[in-house]
Image (cartoon, rainbow, N blue to C red):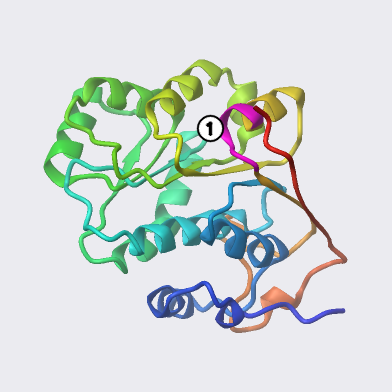
Amino acid sequence: MAQAKRFSELSVLSPETLEVINSLNFKFCTPVQETTIPLFCGHKDVAVDACTGSGKTLAFIIPVIERLRKVEEKLHVNQVGAIVIVPTRELAKQVFKVAEPFVSSVPGLKCLLLTGGRSVSQDVLEFKSQGGHVIVGTPGRIDDVMKRCLTMSLKSFEVLVLDEADRLLEMGFQRQLDSIMSKLPKQRRTGLFSATQTDAVQALMRAGLRNPVRVNIRVAIATRGDGMGVPGRADGAGKKRKKDEVASEEEEEDD
């Protein structure tokens, strides 16, 4: 069995990000992390076919933070640099928790959780007062806040992530996704992560991604207790993998 690659072997990662990874006691990449992080950190849209528990959360959080770390001008309080859209409140909270230490490694960068459970006006007020350079949330609430918060600026927007895209569509969020994407700059990077490739997911991919690299991961791994499926711990959990199948292919851009 091939040795899992260490995070320290990924040349695209900054010392600050590696420091966070080390503080979380991670050493080894999962297949989806090893394949996706270098692509998404570069100038590539990615369409990733990976199941829950594959470690995909770090596979998109790390590239999001690396891209925002490299922006030439510090984002103002009203500017949004990245949006991560997930289907449920619980998943949004989990992704937000994973993102927090990485966001904190970039001076001045703020992360905002938008999932409902309180009034839209409260969310708008929090954005205006504290900022939300990285927004993690559910499509309905993100769409509502974008419509209500007229001071929100997307001119420096860098990255959109659609996590569990198949579930987003199954739960009826097509209209909200279309509304959100219509407001974003076309010159952005987009990552789509899905456990299944339905016709609806393929249509969303064509509408929202530009010449994506397809990544197909089929692997079973041990998961952490928090359910985020992020192995690669110092105790060698990252080595406990079954046979995996990794395939990447670049598709022609659909005009």
- Identify the residue at horizontal 87%, vertical 79% (top origin): 1
> Which of 234 and 195 lies nearest the eye of the viewer?
195
Residue to which mark 1 is pinned = 87
Would you say 54 lies left or right of 59 here? Answer: right
- Quarter holding residue 101: bottom left
Image coordinates for residue 107, horizontal then vertical, percent = 23, 66
Q: Is residue 142 left or right of residue 43?
A: left
Q: Is residue 13 above or below residue 234?
A: above
Magenta stretch encompasses residue 88: no
Q: Residue furthest front?
A: 255
Q: Residue at x 42, y 73 (%)?
A: 17
Left or right of residue 104: residue 2 = right
| Image quadrant in which the C terminus is located | top right
Start and end of the magenta stretch?
206-211
How busy is the neighbourhood of tag 1: few (under 14 within 10 Å), some, or many (20 plus)?
A: many
Determine the residue positioned at 58% across, 58% down.
59
Q: Residue 38 location, x and y as percent?
A: 59, 65
Compared to 175, does 177 lie above or below?
below
Q: Nearer the viewer, residue 169 or 118?
A: 169
* Position in image of residue 102 (x %, y %): 38, 64
Q: Residue 178: give x, y in percent of width and height.
A: 49, 21
**Element type where label 1 sits in the image:** loop
| Residue 209 on the magenta span | yes
Residue located at (69% from left, 74% from top): 238
